[in-house]
Amino acid sequence: MNTASNLMGRWLASFLEKPSRDYLPFSITDTETLRETMQPGDVLLVEGNLRISVAIKYLTQSTWSHAALYIGDVLDQKNAAGEKLNLVEADLTQGVIAVPLSKYAASNTRICRPVHLQADDQQKLIQFMLDSLGKEYDLKNVIDLMRFLLPTPPVPTHWRRRMLAIGSGDPTRAICSTLIAQAFQKVHYPILPEVERIKMMAACGCMYTEKEILHIRHHSLFTPRDFDLSPWFRVIKPSLEKGFDYTKLNWAS
């Protein structure tokens, strides 16, 4: 029974990883510019054009469906074309893999940078991703995968994020943002924690102050959109980082 479920799961995963039609990128950053702009520890958000991407974008109400962590040149490996593998991501069918920046040369992307990340924590973050390389996901939990076959299920908005965590099994952990969320949680860097505000009496005993307590959310509930929304990640736009002067643009008549 497990073998049949696993075969069905792999077939479903392969189907969901196929490109969807009518994808039209509109804000592409070339690979070289991305490489010059990105720093180790940056999160690269990708709009994505796969069948599973359509479902994730709908469920998260966001244009971003995929995320990868930039590790720089620490991995001494190249692909068949001689390109350095400087992104680590979770793939539904291949597990955790390293890929070159050029993989997303034809996609809409966004760079999210953790602010003031300490050097030792940056190394721990990258090491966690490197240690995860080669991990494969058990896809026999077919129910976890079937939720993506209906890209736009008629459910209330406030339930949609929860649909990503159905089962919380391996197919759920294969969602890219889950792995990256685990990495940042290892170094206690906030993404979008739950905030509890409690009232505390001041030392004078004459007034109350508020104190914020942060609670870690389960990593299965994180989505690519969270890195974009997080107040602790800076959005980096390569076209502005390189220097931008609108007066030098060439407009058609």
Image (cartoon, rainbow, N blue to C red):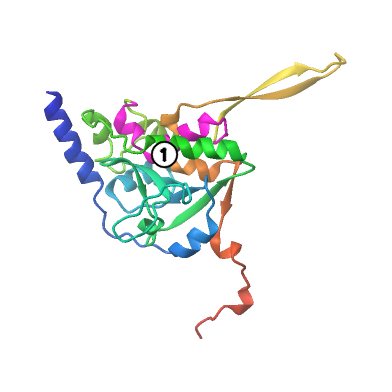
**Magenta residues, start to end:** 168-191
In this rendering, does residue 28 appear at all?
no
Q: Quadrant of the N terminus?
A: top left
Whether 142 is among the magenta residues is no
Image vertical order of residue 77 relative to residue 239, above or below: above
Q: Amino acid at mark 1?
A: Leu
Horizontal side, residue 83 vs residue 1: left or right: right
- Which structural element holds mark 1? helix
Q: Nearer the viewer, residue 26 or 95?
A: 95
* Residue 206, horizontal then vertical, whole percent: 86, 16
Say which residue appears at 38% left-offset and 35% top-offset.
132
Image vertical order of residue 102 relative to residue 114, above or below: below
Q: Count the marks: how many?
A: 1
**Which residue carries the number 1 mark?**
130
Single out the residue that lies furthest toward the front. 76
* Residue 166, horizontal then vertical, whole percent: 33, 28
* Residue 217, horizontal then vertical, whole percent: 50, 27
Our reading of the magenta stretch's main secondary structure is helix
Say which residue appears at 26% left-offset and 54% top-offset.
19
Single out the residue that lies furthest toward the bottom. 253
Horizontal side, residue 217 vs residue 116: left or right: left
Say which residue appears at 85% left-offset and 13% top-offset.
205
Mark 1, residues whose alpha carbon is within 10 Å: few (<14), some, or many (≥20)? some
Say which residue appears at 33% left-offset and 36% top-offset.
174
In this rendering, does residue 2 appear at all?
yes
Single out the residue that lies furthest toward the top. 205
* Residue 45, horizontal then vertical, whole percent: 45, 49
Q: Nearer the viewer, residue 69 or 144?
A: 69
Q: Nearer the viewer, residue 253 or 242?
A: 242
